[in-house]
Image (tube, rainbow, N blue to C red):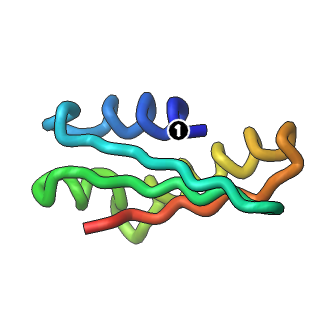
Amino acid sequence: MKDLVEYIVRALVDKPDAVRVDETEREQSLIVELWVDKDDLGKVIGKQGRTIRAVRALLAAAAVRLKKRVLLEIQE
């Protein structure tokens, strides 16, 4: 999941080197934390949150295979 998020977000932002993704696994869930440059935060979220919602939908679809719930959190 970490690689998927990193791949998608790096394609969206102007400063791909500033992207950092961490993954924490729990019993029934997987928490993915995302850090981006402050200037790129709007691009990741998108208008009315559409872009981040689409990324979360892709993660949810990929998580079905793992039989886990995936939470994507954007950190500042």
Location of the N terminus by quadrant is top right
- At which x and y percent is residue 60? 72, 51
Residue 29 or 38: which is nearer the viewer? 29
The residue located at (40%, 70%) in the rendering is 48
Q: Please tell me in which quadrant of the rendered image residue 75 appears.
A: bottom left
Image label count:
1
Residue 11 or 2: which is nearer the viewer? 2
Q: Is residue 76 left or right of residue 56?
A: left
Q: Is residue 57 left or right of residue 50?
A: right
Q: Is residue 49 above or below residue 20?
A: below
Helix, strand or loop for disc 1: helix
Structural crowding at the residue carrying mark 1, measured as other residues with C-alpha within 10 Å and reported as few (<14), some (14–19) or many (≥20): some
- At which x and y percent is residue 74? 38, 63
Q: Is residue 57 left or right of residue 21?
A: right
- At which x and y percent is residue 17? 18, 32
Q: Circle 1 is placed at which residue position?
A: 2
Q: Amino acid at mark 1?
A: Lys
- At which x and y percent is residue 32? 53, 54
Q: Please tell me in which quadrant of the rendered image residue 14 appears.
A: top left
